[in-house]
Amino acid sequence: MHTIDPNDLQAVWLTLKLASVTSFLLLLIGTPLSWWLAYSSKWYRGIVAALIALPLVLPPTVLGFYLLLLMGPQGIVGALTNALHLGTLPFTFAGLVVGSVLFSLPFAVLPIRSAFEAMGTRPLEVAATLRASGWDRFVSVALPLSRSGFLAAIILAFAHTVGEFGVVLMLGGNIPGETRVLSVAIYNHVEAMEYGAAHWLAGGMVLFSFIVLVGLYLSGGKISQVVR
Amino acid sequence: MTQIQLARMDSNGIRADFKLRLDSFALDAAFGAPSAGVTALFGPSGSGKTTLLRCIAGLERAAGSLHVDGEVWQDETRFVATHKRPLGYVFQEASLFSHLSVRANLEYGLKRVASAERKVDLEQVVEWLGLERLIGRGDTAKLSGGERQRIAIGRALLTSPRILLMDEPLAALDSASKQDILPYLERLHRELKIPVLYVSHSLDEVARLADHLVLLEQGRVIASGALMETLARLDLPTGHFDDAGAVIEAAVAHHDETYHLTRLDFPGGCLWVGKVDQSSSRRVRARVLARDVSIAIQQPQGSSINNILNARIEEIRDEGPDKVIVRMKVGDTHMLLSRITRRSRDHLGLTVGKDVFAQVKSVALMS
């Protein structure tokens, strides 16, 4: 019987932490962004939408490469973080979070945006005529009416972050307890011909992903449309 | 409307003046409405009535000004946000919140109004709109269109609005639902103490519910005034609709059990109509269509028509190559319209000022 390597447990824990932090940040960033994309009539809305959707079509290594350059000591972001005495972000957990947030942004924005668009402006107008202020309208009408979009966004962002490899490898490398997440640990095991250990982790990932998707499809139409 | 006319309006009423340019259409509408009763914003689709109502609610931002009960809701420098305007708005579709129960929908606005400002309570509204059997329902999706609209009206009223805006609340309903909801609207008309602005493109609805009429065409106000007077005007498009006609307000005077008829009295004469429900109110509104009125120059003898009124011709206008429409005064305050052929006009020698007999073939009772 194979016992799980404590390093692997650490990788699992790190992965869950990364996915949780990323999903949380994505909700914070993705919600106002989705709102703007759903309701703005600015001409550059399409450009912003395209920028956000880029990670859907780009190889993760490309995104990781440019993030590495940007956040490295020679990059603009790197120079900024250095000037703030924060050091540079690559090869840190914080760097992974930044990369994951950008990489998973479309998976959070698309379902929330389509939920807002499906709701339309009418319920918000009705609420305004019933004395609800802007924030009140958002909390009491927009959030509950687009909850399935939010649920889909959280699940997709979380699962997508758990499964990410390319950006992590380019940006975070392989530091145990800091940047060595599950997908990297599996890669390491395979490289070292430790197929048993790789199976434990890879099989667990398969099971996890399957459960997430079953949850998605069972929960009804709106969410599954996003990943159809 | 000119400034002089505006100034003459009740200072407690509504004064609106909006200019808005959209892609396909421009709104340039000024009108006044009194502080009580139902003012209908009437016009064909695309005439800007809904846009005008949205401007009044602050849902659309136009240039211009809006005063309600002497309070400024909008002028050059100020624009009160929709949620700070004490108004009720009923949309064409009921637009109930699908995530809330019937009761929670009704209470949504109520909860957001300070208790000191609440003038109507839930029980009252439930009773007015007959919501007793609906208020316990959890899901609003299974309700009929008429039921949903009644809840939407109740929800708006529960904010104790100072003005009620209704955007064709019947237009999305089938005729059965319409019949279901009209009595409630008529009741609100009688019992509400606040002004109502009612957008409609149905002359029948307007004749039934409104006291004042604002006529819109291509984003402009072309006329505005008391309902009965305005509907009888021949210089307006409404005077030439297929269902053009006059509205008469009358008192229920007598029930004839033998022939199952009811007599309605109004200053100028009386009308016999099919027997009215005894319990219905003492005052009723009747609509007499121009096509149902014929004219005789002598007292008709041996006619099957029950209702023959003394009238004086006030105006005659051509309507196409073969027809004319005649406006007559009945008594001091009421009007009748009659659509006859040009041939009849010439044969009878009908001219303005002539005393005639108006034969009314059919009367539609409105409430």
Image (cartoon, grey):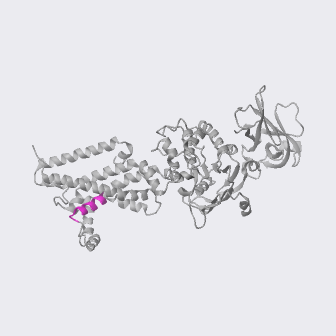
Q: Is residue A97 magenta?
A: yes
**Where, by quadrant of the figure, is residue B15 drawn?**
bottom right
Q: Residue at x 33, y 42 (%)?
A: A217
Q: How many marks?
A: 0
Above or below residue B365? Residue B7 is below
- Quick one: A95 or A228, which is closer to the camera? A95
As drawn, the residue found furthest toward the bottom would be A83
Tell me, yes or no, if residue B167 can be seen here. yes
Position of B75 with respect to A105 (left or right) is right
Main SS of residues in magenta? helix
- Quick one: B46 or B257, which is closer to the camera? B257
Q: Is residue A157 magenta?
A: no
Give coordinates of residue B278: x percent, y percent.
72, 32
Give coordinates of residue B167: x percent, y percent.
60, 49
Q: Residue at x 49, y 56 (%)?
A: A133
Tell me, yes or no, if residue A163 can be seen here. no
As drawn, the residue found furthest toward the front would be B116
Position of B331 with respect to A181 (left or right) is right
Q: Quadrant of the N terminus of chain B?
A: bottom right
- Quick one: B164 or B222, which is closer to the camera? B164
Position of B120 with respect to A187 (left or right) is right
Give coordinates of residue A104: x percent, y percent.
31, 56
Give coordinates of residue B55: x percent, y percent.
59, 57
- The residue range painted magenta reads A90-103
